[in-house]
Amino acid sequence: MSEYTLALSEAELGRYQMMARQAVAREASQLAAAGVVAGATVADIGCGPAAMSIELARLVGPSGQALAAAAILIQRSEARNVSLHEAGATATGLEPGSVDVVMLRHVLAHNGGHEQAIVDHLATLIRPGGSVYLVDGDQSAARFLDIDPDLDDLMTRYLEFHRRRGNDPAIGLRLARLLAAAGLEVTSFEGAYNILTAPPGMRPPAWAARDAMLADGIVDDDVLHRWETALARHDSAPVRLTVFAPGFIAIGRRSA
């Protein structure tokens, strides 16, 4: 599978935490419908630094359990119902039929060519009546308001970076199809633009992937310096950058 290319800095951790808090508030009805409720066992596959895992742990409460693959933020939190397990997304090592909900957020876009194999495996992990909960986007349709002109090529280069690696930046459009092909009943498939006013210090995924993009020849040192200077200007700008990012949520349920 493709190598995950977003480096984890303190700013990146902050972005993950902000996204997780927003996701819990925005997706409350979908999470409940999928079975993320008190006492449930939830597997958060490809969780990055586990920001969402911690939020899931709060939702399922002390009688439930969240399974994650990172410890950075867990160690800083008060969550005690999160256990760690490191494995690949197509071979997690979890027992088949052992969890109520499997969640996969913004992972498929980094694993071009393996999307169906990943979802097929996740479908084996849920109990009868359980759900696979997929979240991903269409990065090719992202829009920006009040962006610095020196960042105009940032998203174009980032999309080219993913395409060269065989990834699908618009994988969110195919989430329901992936669930159906895995033999699950698609109970929900929704999409919306997520609107975010970027706080000072926040950096986009393209910046977190800059070392990999440099190694792949997508950018050079001059481009990175130009981006870094423009991002610093954004930090002190009186008008904040607004990001419009299309996101999709699909839920697939196994027959009881």
Image (tube, grey):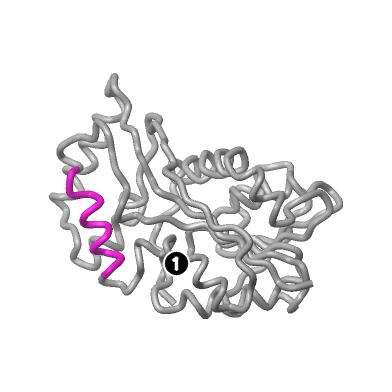
On-image quarter of the N terminus: bottom left
> Which residue is located at x 39 percent, y 73 percent?
112
Q: Relative to 234, does residue 214 appear above or below in the rendering?
A: below
List the single residue furthest toward the top: 238
**Magenta segment main secondary structure:** helix
Image location (x, y in percent) of residue 49: 55, 53
Image location (x, y in percent) of residue 11: 43, 41
> Which residue is located at x 28 percent, y 39 percent?
144
Tell whether 76 sits left or right of 118: right
Tell whether 166 sits left or right of 24: left
Tell whether 236 sits left or right of 173: left
On-image quarter of the C terminus: bottom right
Give the tally of numbered discs: 1
Q: Quadrant of residue 168?
A: bottom left
Q: Relative to 28, does residue 206 appear above or below in the rendering?
A: below
Q: Within 10 Å of the Cα at label 1, are there few (<14), some (14-19), or many (20+) other Cα atoms?
A: some
> Which residue is located at x 24 percent, y 66 percent?
215
Q: Is residue 84 visible?
A: no
Secondary element at image label 1:
helix
> Which residue is located at x 70 percent, y 52 percent?
33
- The stretch in magenta equals 152-163
Residue 105 on the magenta segment: no
Q: Badge 1 is on which residue?
A: 174
For the residue pair 243 and 93, the one nearer the viewer reads as: 243
**Amino acid marked by disc 1:** Arg
Image location (x, y in percent) of residue 131: 69, 64
Q: Is residue 9 visible?
A: yes
Tell whether 212 sits left or right of 41: left
Q: Relative to 63, does residue 25 appear above or below in the rendering?
A: above
